[in-house]
Image (cartoon, grey):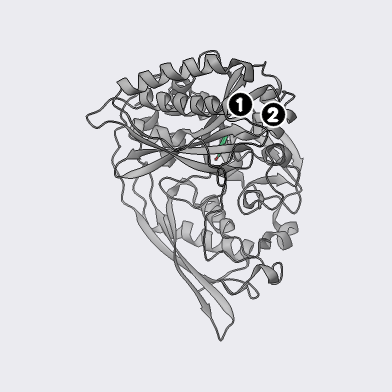
């Protein structure tokens, strides 16, 4: 979710990337994304491997499970208009500013998002389309938008730099609160008859999750309740009835363009799975969308589709969704929930790569914001991107296994353990060595590290 940066203590305070200094050597003058050619600049950080994913359109390609989930969700929002083909290339203005993200929000950093150049980026969430879609939505209308979204991230079995979201929103006229309350009563009855265990949270908290100053409780609480009831009902019907009742919990949350805000988690295999973020859209955003905040309220949600599809279809590794292997594709039928049968597992192969960061990269922790900008920058996400760029989907996992500061040398050393595994065949030792060598060469070339 976009609200907070994940705390990674070994990320130095500097946000400037080494690639900034070296871009003339490595970044072509233009890049072409979805048939459109763009000039590059000091912000460009979109690797070709990620750009290639934009062509896949998994969420509208049957019998892909993400397409099935998209349709399943849409079938629960009768009368909502669906937008499933909006291009992933957006402006930072749409992705962030239109939603009131502050200028220093961590999500804007080059280390967190993919930029084609300073003026265009890959959307990091479907909320990037909220303002435009609201603009063409009639009063009291509802809409859904499903799309691929992109965030720079580390690599493991449940994180991939591209994933899918469905955004949904409903406008309500403040004059229609009685109708909405009746609808909510009906939804509550449906839920109490089901076996779902729902831990609800307060509608708002005056300090930490407030109502907007212009919203009276009577014209907003039914909307906030409708949001949580509609979504709880959705998940009740999506997750098949099993011997153990579905257990969900609502907790307060924080997004720049909603207040109050909530998140929903579902209990799954001894843990809590974060399914979505949502809230009451700020008057500012409503006004930007040419609606009248004095007479209209809106709820909006954004949910991660892989998060829902993994437990529903029993898909154990997020990379499988991107597989072109027919042993994956052949297991699914359009519109059907089927349990994925893992095809034979080939053995993993591990390689450790240790290296010195360039002279001048600040000592971790010692680098304070006060000293920000001084010294040489280091972006952890550049590392993951390069490893993925060279190793492709043979890279199952990358872990930081060592990070130390050598006092005498005044240099920082990192070591990563890369797990290689193919979904399709056994990897031979020479091939793994070759890919590892290519990764080392690219790291040296692009990040000026010194392999140890
Ligand atoms: N866009 C948010 C995310 O990706 C989710 C969200 C959507 C929150 C709509 C509030 C309203 O985390």
Q: Nearer the viewer, residue 279 or 347?
A: 279
Q: Secondary structure at mark 1?
A: strand
Marks 2 and 1, the one that precedes in the sequence: 2
Local crowd at mark 2 within 10 Å, few (<14), some, or many (≥20)?
many
Residue at point 53%, 34% (across, down): 278
Q: Which residue is mark 2?
A: 286
Q: Which mark is residue 298?
A: 1
Ligand 1 resides in the quarter of the picture at: top right
Check contact, mark 2 vs mark 1: CB within 8 A: yes
In the orientation shown, which residue stands out farthest toward the bottom? Answer: 408
Q: Position of residue 347 (x, y in %)?
A: 31, 51
140 vs 434: above or below: above
Q: Is residue 83 visible?
A: no
Q: Position of residue 276 (x, y in %)?
A: 48, 36
Local crowd at mark 1 within 10 Å, few (<14), some, or many (≥20)?
many
Rounded to the nearest angstrom, the CA distance separating label 2 from label 1 is: 8 Å
Q: Which mark is residue 136?
A: none
Q: Is residue 71 visible?
A: yes
Q: Position of residue 12 (x, y in %)?
A: 60, 66
């Amino acid at each position: 979710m976009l609200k907070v940066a994940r705390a990674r203590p070994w990320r130095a305070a500097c946000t400037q990337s080494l690639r900034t200094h070296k871009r003339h050597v490595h970044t072509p003058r233009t890049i072409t994304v979805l048939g459109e050619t763009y000039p590059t600049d000091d912000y460009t950080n979109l690797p070709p491997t990620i750009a290639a994913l934009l062509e896949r359109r998994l969420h509208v390609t049957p019998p892909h499970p993400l397409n099935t989930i998209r349709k399943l969700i849409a079938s629960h929002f009768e009368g909502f208009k669906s937008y499933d083909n909006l291009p992933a290339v957006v402006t930072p203005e749409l992705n962030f500013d239109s939603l009131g993200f502050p200028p220093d929000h961590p999500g804007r950093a080059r280390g967190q998002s993919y930029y084609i150049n300073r003026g265009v980026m890959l959307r990091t969430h479907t909320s990037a389309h909220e303002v435009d879609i609201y603009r063409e939505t009639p009063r009291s209308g509802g809409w859904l938008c499903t799309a691929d979204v992109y965030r720079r991230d580390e690599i493991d079995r449940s994180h991939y730099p591209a994933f899918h979201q469905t955004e949904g929103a409903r406008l309500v006229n403040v004059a229609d609160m009685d109708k909405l309350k009746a609808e909510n009563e009906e939804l509550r009855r449906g839920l109490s008859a089901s076996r779902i265990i729902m831990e609800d949270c307060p509608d708002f908290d005056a300090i930490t999750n407030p109502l907007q100053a212009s919203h009276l409780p009577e014209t907003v609480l039914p909307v906030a309740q409708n949001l949580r009831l509609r979504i709880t009902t959705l998940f009740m019907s999506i997750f098949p009835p099993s011997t153990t009742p579905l257990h969900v919990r609502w907790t307060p949350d924080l997004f720049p363009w909603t207040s109050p805000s909530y998140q929903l988690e579902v209990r799954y295999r001894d843990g809590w799975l974060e399914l979505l973020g949502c809230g009451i859209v700020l008057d500012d955003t409503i006004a930007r969308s040419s609606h009248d905040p004095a007479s209209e309220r809106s709820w909006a949600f954004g949910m991660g589709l892989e998060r829902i599809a993994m437990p529903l279809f029993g898909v154990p590794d997020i990379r499988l969704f991107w597989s072109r292997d027919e042993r994956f594709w052949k297991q699914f039928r359009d519109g059907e929930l089927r349990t994925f049968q893992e095809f034979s597992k080939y053995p993993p192969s591990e390689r450790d790569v240790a290296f010195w960061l360039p002279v001048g990269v600040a000592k971790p922790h010692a680098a304070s914001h006060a000293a920000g900008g001084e010294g040489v920058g280091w972006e952890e996400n550049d590392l993951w991107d390069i490893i993925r760029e060279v190793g492709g989907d043979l890279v199952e996992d990358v872990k930081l296994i060592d990070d130390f500061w050598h006092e005498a040398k005044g240099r920082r050393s990192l070591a990563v353990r890369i797990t290689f595994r193919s979904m399709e065949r056994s990897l031979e030792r020479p091939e793994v060595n070759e890919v590892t060598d290519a990764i080392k060469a690219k790291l040296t070339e692009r990040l000026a590290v010194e392999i140890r």
